[in-house]
Image (cartoon, rainbow, N blue to C red):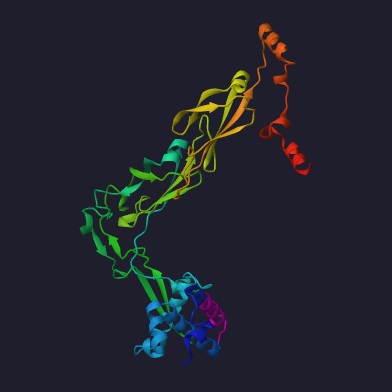
C-alpha cells in the first residue's frame, strides 16, 4: 500500500493547506467524470481521497505518522471509507459541495435544517468626541422577531401542533441511490414536503400564519470601542432577523459613520483646526481658547508668530483602535488681514508701513525661512 504522503505528492512536514491543495489537484486530475471508463484513474481518485481523509484529520495523521497504515485502517477499508459515497463526501468538502455540473445534489449535506434568518445592516453616526472616547449606543431595529403566541413554532398551540414529516421521517431529506460502473451514487435532496426541516405544521398559528415570526422592533445595545472610523463595522451575532419556525437568527452589521465636527477635522489619529489671529495678537503674543475633543483649552501664542505656523497639542487626538498610541491636535495659525479699514485705522497703518520692524526679513529667522531659502543655505 502506497504511503499517503507519496500519494498526494507532499512531504511529511506539509501544512494542512498544502495537503488540501495537493488533494484538490489530484482529485480534479483523476475524477471519474473527467476520465470515463478509465479504471486506473478511478483507483487513483479513491487512493487520493483515502490519503486526504487521514492526513486532513490531525488525530488520524498523528496515528498514521506513528504506526503507518495499521494505525488508521481499524478493520475497515483503507482510510476509513466504507463506499464511494464517502469518497465523494470528502471531495465535496474540498470543493464546497458543488464539484461540477450534475454533481451538486450528490454532495449536499443532509439532515434536518432550520431556515436561518437573514442578516441586517444599519448605519450608526458618531461624533468625533464619541469616536475618541468610545460609547455605548442603543439601536432600535425593525426586523422579524419570534412569535410569542406559538412559541416560534408556527403552530397553533405551540410544539404540540408540530409533527414529524411523514415523507422524510424527520430526516429533512430524501435520498435516491443509483448504481453505476463506478459504484453507488447517492442523490440527496431536501424533502419537498417539509422543505428540509424534518417537521410539518398541522395547524398554523393564526397570528404569524405558520411562519413562527412576526415583523416587530427590537433594541440592541452596541459597545463602540474608542478609535473606530468611518467604514469600520461591528458584527453582532444573533441580532438579525429571526429564522422561520425557530430557525437560527441572522446577524446585525453596524457600519460606522462620522458626523462632521463644527471646528475639528480628523486626519488619521490627529485632529486639525484653524486658529485665526488678529495682526496685533500675532505681533504681540496672546493667550487664546481653542476647541478640543475634551472641551475648550487655553493655548499660549508667542509674540511674532507667523501665518501658517502649526502648533501641536500632544495627546489631544484620536486613540489607536486596539493600541496604545494617541494622536495630537494640530492648530494652524492664520493671521487675519482686515479687508475694510476706517480712516483712523488706515492712518495708523500708514505710519507703520516703513517702520523697520514691519519689514519682512525671513532670511534672518531660520524657522521662518522658505523652503528654497533653506536649500540655498545648505549648498552655500
* Front-lying residue, 106 or 285: 285
Q: In the current view of this chain or complex, which residue is farthest to the bottom?
A: 1
* Front-lying residue, 354 or 319: 354
* Front-lying residue, 94 or 195: 94
Is 147 rendered above or below residue 159?
A: above
* Front-lying residue, 271 or 198: 271
Q: On the picture, is 338 further left or further right than 167?
A: right
Residue drawn at x 22%, y 55% is: 158
Residue drawn at x 43%, y 80% is: 53
Q: In the current view of this chain or complex, which residue is farthest to the top?
A: 344
Q: Position of residue 177 (x, y in %)?
A: 40, 80
Is 67 rendered above or below residue 294?
A: below
Q: In the current view of this chain or complex, which residue is farthest to the right?
A: 380
Q: Quadrant of residue 179?
A: bottom left
Magenta-highlighted residues: 21-36
Tell whether position 34 is magenta.
Answer: yes
Q: Quadrant of residue 62?
A: bottom left
Total tally of numbered discs in the picture: 0
Q: Position of residue 347 (x, y in %)?
A: 70, 8
Using the rendered image of the protein, determine whether residue 8 is visible from the camera's viewpoint.
yes
Q: Quadrant of the C terminus?
A: top right
Q: On the picture, is 93 further left or further right than 333?
A: left
Q: Main secondary structure of the magenta part?
A: helix
Using the rendered image of the protein, determine whether residue 127 is visible from the camera's viewpoint.
no
Q: Position of residue 197 (x, y in %)?
A: 33, 63
Is 171 rendered above or below residue 182?
A: above
Tell whether position 286 is magenta.
Answer: no
Amino acid at each position: 500500500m502506497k504511503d499517503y504522503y507519496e500519494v498526494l505528492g507532499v512531504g511529511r512536514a506539509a501544512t494542512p493547506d498544502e495537503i488540501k491543495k495537493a488533494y484538490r489537484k489530484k482529485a480534479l486530475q483523476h475524477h471519474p467524470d473527467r476520465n470515463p471508463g478509465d479504471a486506473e484513474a478511478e483507483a487513483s481518485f479513491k487512493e487520493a481521497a483515502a490519503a486526504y481523509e487521514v492526513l486532513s484529520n490531525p488525530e488520524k495523521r498523528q496515528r498514521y505518522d506513528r504506526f503507518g497504515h495499521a494505525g488508521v485502517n481499524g478493520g475497515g477499508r483503507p482510510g476509513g471509507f466504507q463506499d464511494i459515497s464517502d469518497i465523494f463526501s470528502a471531495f465535496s468538502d474540498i470543493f464546497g459541495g458543488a464539484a461540477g455540473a450534475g454533481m451538486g445534489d450528490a454532495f449536499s449535506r443532509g439532515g434536518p435544517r432550520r431556515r436561518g434568518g437573514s442578516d441586517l445592516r444599519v448605519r450608526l453616526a458618531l461624533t468625533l468626541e464619541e469616536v475618541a472616547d468610545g460609547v455605548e449606543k442603543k439601536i432600535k431595529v425593525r426586523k422579524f422577531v419570534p412569535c410569542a403566541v406559538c412559541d416560534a413554532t408556527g403552530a397553533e398551540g405551540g410544539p404540540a401542533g408540530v409533527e414529524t414529516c411523514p415523507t422524510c421521517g424527520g430526516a429533512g431529506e430524501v435520498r435516491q441511490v443509483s448504481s453505476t460502473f463506478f459504484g453507488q451514487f447517492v442523490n440527496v435532496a431536501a424533502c419537498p414536503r417539509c422543505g428540509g426541516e424534518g417537521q410539518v405544521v398541522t395547524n398554523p398559528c393564526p397570528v404569524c400564519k405558520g411562519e413562527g415570526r412576526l415583523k416587530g422592533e427590537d433594541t440592541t445595545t452596541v459597545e463602540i470601542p474608542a478609535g473606530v472610523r468611518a467604514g469600520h463595522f461591528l458584527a453582532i451575532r444573533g441580532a438579525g432577523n429571526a429564522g422561520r419556525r425557530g430557525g437560527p437568527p441572522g446577524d446585525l452589521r453596524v457600519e460606522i459613520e462620522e458626523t462632521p465636527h463644527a471646528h475639528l477635522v480628523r486626519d488619521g489619529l490627529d485632529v486639525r483646526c484653524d486658529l485665526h489671529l488678529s495682526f496685533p495678537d500675532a505681533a504681540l503674543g496672546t493667550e487664546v481658547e481653542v476647541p478640543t475633543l475634551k472641551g475648550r483649552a487655553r493655548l499660549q501664542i508667542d509674540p511674532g508668530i507667523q501665518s501658517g505656523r502649526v502648533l501641536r497639542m500632544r495627546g489631544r487626538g484620536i486613540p489607536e483602535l486596539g493600541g496604545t498610541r494617541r494622536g495630537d491636535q494640530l492648530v494652524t495659525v492664520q493671521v487675519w488681514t482686515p479687508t475694510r479699514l476706517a480712516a483712523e485705522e488706515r492712518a495708523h497703518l500708514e505710519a507703520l508701513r516703513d517702520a523697520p520692524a514691519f519689514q519682512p526679513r525671513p532670511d534672518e529667522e531660520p524657522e521662518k525661512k522658505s523652503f528654497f531659502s533653506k536649500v540655498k543655505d545648505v549648498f552655500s
